[in-house]
């Protein structure tokens, strides 16, 4: 498909030089740039999913009350001078 767009002269000069250096057409360079912009701005349709980093075990250890952060902190730093 053909279309017409206005590109600032300094920018056009830069992309022409780049296309020449890389041995590609101006069209190829513009299409590549547009694809990169579209890919970067595309919103993932499947959402974000954390990888499973769970470990084996029996859950909360005896003597630890789940949600009691003060006691948990004391156990974590026990013997470490904190």
Image (cartoon, rainbow, N blue to C red):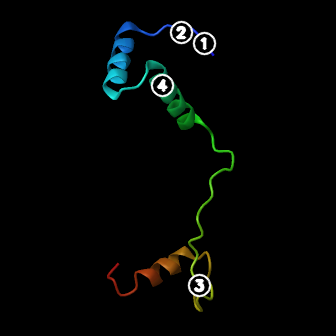
Q: Nearer the viewer, residue 39 or 58?
A: 39
Which residue is under mark 3? Answer: 56
Judge depth for marks 2 and 3 and give the one in front: 2
Which residue is under mark 1? Answer: 2
Which residue is under mark 2? Answer: 5
Estimate the x, y position of residue 67 in percent, counting from the top left: 61, 75
Q: Residue furthest front?
A: 23
Q: How crowded is mark 3: few (under 14 residues within 10 Å), some or many (20 or more)?
A: few
Of callouts 3 and 1, the N-terminal one: 1
* 67 w.r.t. 30: above or below: below
Give SS at disc 4: helix
Of callouts 2 and 3, the N-terminal one: 2
Which residue is under mark 4? Answer: 28
Q: Residue furthest right?
A: 45
What is the spatial separation of the Cα atoms under label 1 and label 4, in whole angstroms?
14 Å
Task: Say if mark 3 contacts mark 1, CB within 8 Å.
Answer: no
What is the spatial separation of the Cα atoms under label 4 and label 3, in whole angstroms?
52 Å
Q: Quadrant where the C terminus lies?
A: bottom left
Task: Say if mark 1 contacts mark 4, CB within 8 Å.
Answer: no
What is the spatial separation of the Cα atoms under label 2 and label 4, in whole angstroms?
16 Å
Of callouts 4 and 3, the N-terminal one: 4
Estimate the x, y position of residue 33 in percent, counting from the top left: 48, 28
Give SS at disc 1: loop
Q: Residues within 10 Å of mark 4 (few under 14, many from 20)?
A: few
Task: Say if mark 2 contacts mark 4, CB within 8 Å.
Answer: no
Judge depth for marks 4 and 3 and give the one in front: 4
Locate residue 24: give its quadrant: top left
Give SS at disc 3: loop
């Amino acid at each position: 498909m053909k279309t017409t767009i206005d590109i600032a002269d300094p920018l056009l000069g830069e992309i022409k030089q780049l296309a020449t250096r890389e041995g590609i057409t101006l069209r190829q360079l513009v299409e590549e740039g547009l694809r990169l912009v579209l890919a970067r701005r595309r919103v993932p349709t499947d959402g974000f999913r954390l990888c499973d980093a769970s470990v084996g075990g029996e859950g909360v250890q005896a003597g630890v009350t789940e949600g009691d952060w003060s006691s948990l902190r004391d156990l974590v730093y026990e013997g470490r001078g904190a």
